[in-house]
Image (cartoon, rainbow, N blue to C red):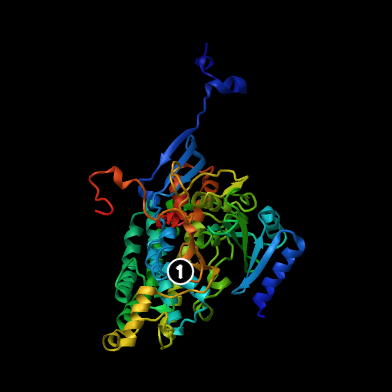
Amino acid sequence: MSQTEQGAMELIEKVKTAFPDHVVGHKVFAGEPYIQVRREGIRDVCRLLKDDLDYDYPVEVTAVDYPGDAERFEVIHVLFSIRHRRRVVLKSRVPEDDCAIDTVADIWRGTNFMERETYDMYGITFTGHPDLRRILMTDDFEGWPLRKDFPIEGRGWRENYDFLPQIGD
Amino acid sequence: MQATEYLWDPESVTEDEALPLLRTEKLMLNMGPQHPATHGVLQVILELEGEKILKATPHLGYLHRGTEKIAEQGSYQHVIPLTDRLDYVCAMANNWAYVRAVEKLMQVQVPERAEWLRTLVAELARISGHLFWLGTQALDIGAMTVFFYTFREREVILDVFERLCGARLTNSYMRIGGVERDIDDWCVDKLRNFLSTFQARIDEYDTLLKENRIWIRRTRDIAVITAEDAVEYGLSGPTVRGSGVFYDLRKVEPYGVYEQLDFEVPLGKRGDTYDRYWVRVREMEQSAHMVAQILDHMPEGPIMTEDPKLKRPDKVLVNVSMEAMIQHFKVVCHGFDVPKGEVYCGTECPKGELGFYIVSDGTGTPYKLKIRAPSYVHLGALDHMSRGYMIADIVTVFGTYDVVMGECDR
């Protein structure tokens, strides 16, 4: 086991011992730890990482859509520690019928925009976010573009204009 | 009776009485999306008190093209031209950021010469991106001459890119597993000529800006951000290094051949616009230094991995050999399958950390591709960094991030 992998395992153990109920699973890929966290515990884990383990740099917040799964969405938090030069990826599952997870925008202010984009693209609500609005799409846009069931071709727009060539002509 | 007695004496009025007289009102001002200094289509709603900015709300998405959605439709190779359109000023660096992420997921070994070539073009892209930034930032602030000078130098780099891959801006030079074409003597000569004069050119920019009183007063102590705030906001690249934070992925997580090159990471002290300007200009010097080292030490060898799933066969062979023809078809039409998994890979681009989060479901199409664009993250700090400054400084503030909207809106 290389040194980076050992560091990754140590980190996973630290998070596990602090919150045994919150951590569901883990893996190490390319020397980086990936921790599966229950969505109820995301704030606790993030606080631990920020305050005690020096993960001071928010890299990315995003989500992945798995339409077939019981808990459809997976929210991803990628964090980096500038002092230890290490990265960690947190993953937490969110079901479709209660599409919400706690915000971490007050822990790292930089995640404000990242969470807004995730909301805009997937419709996942970040509870407690100071300004949860659409950001890349217009305010009156309907639907969540990056969900797998969102069509790649536009619907009902071309038909409204006679002068445009119609699909199928 | 003296005339002064009729005049209003502010000292005699209590604060409560004065309020209705001195009516203050917040002014909402719309800036953009069509504005020459926003480097694309960025709209900012400014809340002003007099000339002071109370709040700046960026409205993004005018250049949103759904890159991440398109990427979920095609093969992994189809994404490479899309990355050109992110930060169209330095497309080479974006190409590299993407192919690195896929290679990290696939655990592909890239030939040594390809890594040297990638580092070479990435550093050239950094010089070209910083030259572009310097010219436009100076133009925004009012110094027009610098723009003409920096674009003269940038032209040389674009000529080399054109020779190397046939395109000046949207390069698509990198492939998963290597690079498309090898560098030739013409490019090497051109680059050596360029390097022989480049330091003098940088000195020339310095004479125009470094001690220019107008430049200093427009940039010194403008858009200050402390090291702690810069880190918490996730700023990257020269923007975070201007605040004195040592966060450069080339040193922190060395990739390419950066471990074998001798270079320094310039750091600012105050975290203001002038320091970020200083950091970028010094970075250009360091990049030029690296390019010189690469030209001297680049080893000979293949530029593309031998993996038949990734490498297109020789064109001559395709015309005569059945197997080569099949392989060509497979590589071009089907692409290749990527093992199931997910990965985040960040690369130090001229603007900052460009990261790709890729989820693969084991097929030849990315299941999910998220682009962590530095410009987007930087604009998250726009409000924080512009509060309390004058309205004339807002152009300086988003100029200092080196924001390119193609990358921000994706």
Per the image, label 1 sits on a secondary structure element best described as: helix
Foreground residue among B111 and B35: B111
Side of B355 relative to A5 (left or right): left
**Image height of B141 relative to B54, above or below:** below
Asked where in the image residue B80 lies, by quadrant, the reply is bottom left
The C terminus of chain B - image quarter: bottom left
Asked where in the image residue B83 lies, by quadrant, the reply is bottom left
Side of B391 relative to A160 (left or right): right
Outermost residue on the left side: it is A163
Side of B68 relative to A10 (left or right): left
From this viewpoint, is residue B207 visible? no
Q: Position of residue B148 (x, y in %)?
A: 31, 60
Q: Chain of mark 1?
A: B
Residue at mark 1: B98
Asked where in the image residue B118 lies, by quadrant, the reply is bottom left
**Image height of B405 relative to B189, above or below:** above
Outermost residue on the right side: it is A17
Count the labels in the image. Answer: 1
Q: Position of residue B409 (x, y in %)?
A: 43, 54
Foreground residue among A17 and A164: A164
Foreground residue among B286 and B240: B240
From this viewpoint, is residue B342 visible? yes
Q: Position of residue B269 (x, y in %)?
A: 57, 60
Outermost residue on the top side: it is B1
Foreground residue among A115 and B116: A115
Q: Position of residue A33 (x, y in %)?
A: 64, 69
**Image height of B373 relative to B59, above or below:** below
Local crowd at mark 1 within 10 Å, few (<14), some, or many (≥20)?
many
What amino acid type should be assigned to the residue bearing mark 1? Tyr
Q: Residue at x 51, y 52 (%)?
A: A122
